[in-house]
Amino acid sequence: MDARTEHTRRRWNRMAAYREHGERFQTPAMRRTREILCAGARGETLEVAVGTGRNLPHYPPQVRLTAIDLSPEMLGRARERAEELGMAARFLEGDARKLDFPDRSFDTVLCTLAMCAVPDQFGALSEMYRVLVPGGRLLMVDHVEYARFPGRLVERRRENLRRLPREVAVEAGFEVGHHDRLFLGLVERVVAHRP
Ligand SMILES: C[S@@+](CC[C@H](N)C(=O)[O-])C[C@H]1O[C@@H](n2cnc3c(N)ncnc32)[C@H](O)[C@@H]1O
């Protein structure tokens, strides 16, 4: 693991406890967005950057879930949540930019509010494409780059430059079926598939 990735991993390990406490500040709109997105998952499903597992309660029961995250602390909390929910899922340490799975091994890939934390979004989306079967679904919600003042000033100071999730998905080869903006336009929801 390179020094920058190690640094990112340590930072998210420290954040794991705060993220858990932040749970109660999650808006009903965000919870509903997770519900709707997860309802679209089918069959073998991979959640990339699962965090503390906020999406777990919303998956349909038939889904066979594998979840990865860079941070073992985050994964530990997600694992505990799955146990509380009585949910069978695999939790593995992994980097979104180099998924440790064979080509065409999942029917669905889901990722929420995480690509904005990954330096190489195109690399990560290309990996999601690779591990999906043809016809497989990408379900994603993420922050967009803030193009207007004063958000633009914040954007310039960010470690990872954000992009428009839908545009990166198209570059990686996906066909976008649906996209819309939520939360005053700050977040984009994308439903796409591998042709
Ligand atoms: C803002 S949290 C989002 C967590 C979760 N998806 C959610 O919706 O609550 C970002 C997550 O991305 C993970 N992460 C950051 N860089 C990553 C990478 N390169 N590969 C996998 N996970 C990564 C962090 O450890 C953290 O759990």
Image (cartoon, rainbow, N blue to C red):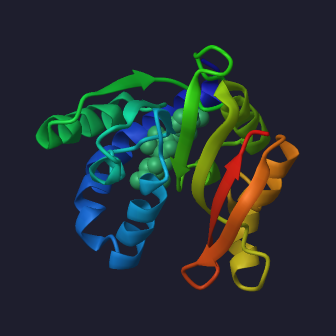
As drawn, 97 above or below 190: above
Q: Position of residue 99 (x, y in %)?
A: 61, 23
- The image position of residue 158, as x and y in percent, is 68, 58
Does residue 162 show up?
Answer: no
Farthest residue, direction right: 171
Task: Specify the quadrant of the image occupied by residue 131.
Answer: top right
Lateral position of residue 156 relative to residue 14, left or right: right
Task: Report the quarter where the C terminus lies.
Answer: top right
Residue at image point 14% right, 36% down: 86
In the image, what residue occupies the spot 35% across and 24% down? 90
Q: As drawn, is 7 to the left or to the right of 129?
A: left
**Residue 147 visible in the current orientation:** yes
- How many discs mark residues in the rendered view? 0
Q: Is residue 183 left or right of residue 173?
A: left
Residue at the image position 62 percent from the left and 25 percent from the top: 3
Residue 177 screen position, x and y as percent: 72, 59
Say which residue appears at 62% left-offset and 44% top-offset. Answer: 137
Kindly indicate the quadrant of the structure image that contains residue 148. Answer: bottom right
Instruction: Give the answer, above or below, for where 141 lies relative to 32.
Output: above
| Viewer-nearest residue: 21 or 30 | 30
The residue nearer to you, when weighing 178 against 84, is 178
Residue 146, image x, y percentages: 72, 74
The N terminus sits in image quarter: top right
